[in-house]
Image: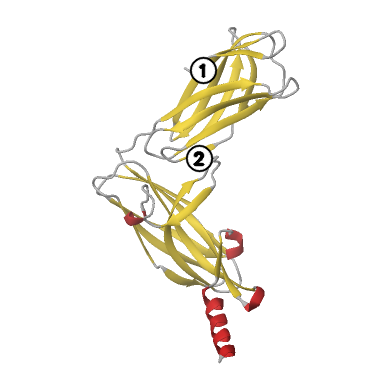
Amino acid sequence: MLKKTVLFLGIILSIICVFITDRAEAAMLRIDKPKVRLSIAPGNTRTGSINVENVSDAPVEVKAYLEDWFYLPPFDGTKEFKPARSLALSCANWITFVPAEFTVPPYGRQSVNFTVTVPKDAKGGHYAVMFFESPMGKQKQTEGVVVNVVGRIGALFYIEPEGAINKLCVLSNLAIGRPTTDSPLGISADFLNEGDVDITAKATYYIMDAQGIVYARGEFNDLFTLPGDKGRFSSEWKENIPQGKYDIVLTLELGERDSLVREALLTVDANGEISYVGDLK
């Protein structure tokens, strides 16, 4: 009787132990729209489709479902996923789609049709992800437990109620200096998304004198933010800058032809050290 009970429990474990990986290449699936960004007037509806392609020589069973997501610090694009409708900025309730389950033949494709309906009172950006999940086989674990491994690939949804968004950001806490005399010149600033829509910010800088001669220029790391997120731009300049007074100009590209330009005064002393950094204006 004990042996039968153990065997029965082992069968249950082999059924319910599932490991999910987000590695798209392992799932043998490919989609034509990894991002779906739509601007829809409140109260209106938009339809579309996502093509799911099987790049393998065997049929693949696929299950489609929605989840929520948000960016993780340091806001380099890394995301965390949560159950659908669990986050304040979720648009999972706005999305319907068919089919939810299907089989894609070898080297074939399947269209998944979706409908997005924006509520009449919607304001600000809302987000979700449509995952396409497929089995990747089984892996035998210790103590006789077999783990079912599935892979998934996702299409990110960015939905904006047309005419009801506020894109706003703040750049502050500019810092320029060298940790040691032999270190590159470090340049950094805080970025805060104060609006109600996502912002992907790409930033550059240049340092010039009063005659307009540029002594340094470079790029910062990209930042990926949702409303309320705060990240930090960082860059380095390895060359020396002569003694004198300069302007540093920071230009942020915020997408959709939106940009932000801020500048500050700085002074380099006779030793090549930054002796003064003004506020960004």
Q: Is residue 42 left or right of residue 83?
A: left
Residue 101 position (above or below residue 45): below
Q: Point out residue 124 in the picture as x, y percentages from the top left corner.
A: 34, 41
Q: CA distance from mark 1 to mark 2?
A: 22 Å
What is the secondary structure assignment of the residue under circle 2?
A: strand
Q: Give amino acid for label 1.
A: Glu
Q: Where does the image place residue 68, in percent across and percent down from the top left?
A: 42, 53
Q: Which residue position is annotated with label 1?
A: 263
- The 10 Å Cα crowd at callout 2, few under 14, some 14 to 19, many 20 or more, is many
Q: Are marks 1 and 2 in contact (CB under 8 Å)?
A: no
- 59 or 250: nearer the viewer: 250
Q: Residue at x 49, y 69 (%)?
A: 62
* Residue 214: x %, y % from top left: 63, 15
Secondary structure under the numbered disc 1 in the rendered image: strand
Which of the labelled discs sits on residue 72, or is there none? none
Q: For the N terminus, which image quadrant?
A: bottom right
Residue 224 numbered tag: 2
Picture residue at 49% right of the left edge, 57% below the top: 154
For disc 1, the neighbor class at 10 Å (few under 14, some 14 to 19, many from 20) is: some
Nearer to the camera, 83 or 8: 8
Would you identify the image quadrant in which residue 217 lies?
top right
